[in-house]
Image: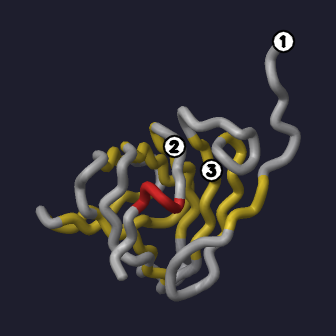
Amino acid sequence: MPTLISTPTQITAAGNKPKIIHEFVGRVNSKTEGVSVARMQSPGGWVEPGQTPDFDEYTVVLRGMLRVQSHDGVLDVRAGQAIITHKGEWVQYSTPENDGAEYIAVCLPAFSPGTVHRDE
């Protein structure tokens, strides 16, 4: 029988400002280790520490703009666009525009604080 996820779990986010993470599927809400699916809402001016994760991340921006910095440059991902970041690649996420951003993030395998490897 299919599993209904009736509500997400709010997860504490890293960064300089409060960001809302609602995990629908993942290690916390559904005890799923293979993939995580979360809705992110980050305010304008939010910056997350850089990271070198052990997972691929697929992100679809629903509203606003998400900035993704890597060693190769900076990409601004706007509403209606998506980006794939690859495991083992250093990235840093931010939402520099005043209105912030809302986006869906899918991590494969599921996000874990132990596998994100954030910068100190």
Of pointers 1 and 3, the one earlier in the residue sequence = 1
- Residue 2 vs 23, above or below: the answer is above
Residue at mark 3: 38
Neighbor class of circle 3 (other Cα within 10 Å; few <14, some 14-19, many 20+) is many
Instruction: Tell me the CA gap for discs 1 and 2.
Output: 23 Å
Residue depth check, mark 1 versus mark 2: number of the one nearer the observer: 1
Amino acid at the residue labelled 1 = Met
Amino acid at the residue labelled 2 = Val
| Quadrant housing the N terminus | top right
Q: At numbered mark 3, what does the secondary structure look like: helix, strand or loop? A: strand
Residue furthest to the top in view is: 1
Q: At numbered mark 1, what does the secondary structure look like: helix, strand or loop? A: loop
- Residue 76 vs 53, above or below: the answer is below
Where residue 36 sits: x, y (%)?
Answer: 58, 42
Q: At numbered mark 2, what does the secondary structure look like: helix, strand or loop? A: strand
The quarter holding residue 91 reads bottom left
The quarter holding residue 75 reads bottom left
Of pointers 2 and 3, the one earlier in the residue sequence = 3
Residue at mark 2: 106
Amino acid at the residue labelled 3 = Ala
Where residue 95 sits: x, y (%)?
Answer: 45, 75
Disc 1 to disc 2: CB gap under 8 Å:
no
Residue at mark 1: 1
Q: How many marks?
A: 3
Disc 2 to disc 3: CB gap under 8 Å:
no
| Quadrant housing the C terminus | bottom left
Which residue is found at the position 50% from the left and 65% from the top? 64
